[in-house]
Amino acid sequence: MANHTGEEKPLRKMSEAFKDLANTLSSQTLDQPAHLEVAPFSRACTLVSPLFRCLGIAFKFAELDYVAKVDDLAEASKYITTLHTMMEQDIQANCVRRAGSHTRNLLRVKRGLDMIKVLFEQIIATEANSLKDPASKAYTQVFAPYHGWAIRTAVSAGMYALPTRQQLMIKLNEDEDSARTQMQNYVASCGTVITYIDKLFISRDLGIDW
């Protein structure tokens, strides 16, 4: 069963893009610090946007915020080569925590990637057709600590409009087996990328909880 995107495979595209990023990180030698270029990273992040759209109104806020932050990183990639360099420039400019800084936006994008990762982990772990429990757990774990009452309430209400598991598979043009494989690939690869980004922040005493 195909959707209006024809033979598009958004899940496959994003899992393959993050596998490439993870391979880039793992292929770098131990005697040199790992580097991840902003351009391929932002392109891979762009491929995650359709997942937020597929989840509907409950994650509309996340989609809008995520897309805006990824667009900023894509623009930054035109004149900044690596995530490492991008953060160093913000540190030197003393603007790391300022709203709109590339580093702050990177942290927000990372949370979006993490939310999808936890969602996939929860979907893989259950056979249930409802996505309410997996989505609720993903939101509670990743986003809820940083949101006020109004947003948390709106998200909770939106959970009742989530697509079913079967509807999500149709939107992604995948069957259960192929979707599970691609989700597992994303979880593993994205985990490597998230760990790298966390280390960038922690190694500079910036923390990741702001």
Image (cartoon, helix red, strand yellow):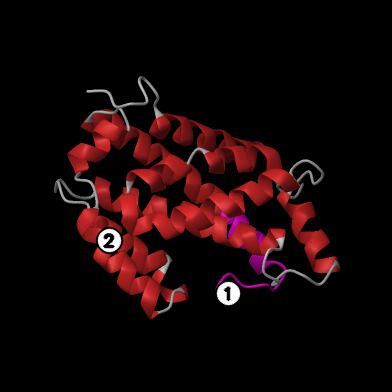
Residue 100, magenta (yes or no) = no
* Percent of width and height locating residue 57: 33, 55
In the displayed orientation, state which residue is furthest to the right. 92
Q: Residue at x 35, y 63 (%)?
A: 139
Badge count: 2
In the displayed orientation, state which residue is furthest to the left. 128
Q: Residue at x 42, y 40 (%)?
A: 50
**Which residues, given as a range, are shown in magenta?**
195-210
Image quadrant in which the C terminus is located: bottom right
Q: Residue at x 67, y 49 (%)?
A: 73
* Mark in the foreground, 1 or 2: 2
Residue occupied by mark 1: 210
Secondary element type, mark 2: helix
Query: Does 171 sit left or right of 28 as displayed?
Result: left
* Percent of width and height locating residue 151: 39, 71
Residue 95 sits above or below residue 165 on the image: below
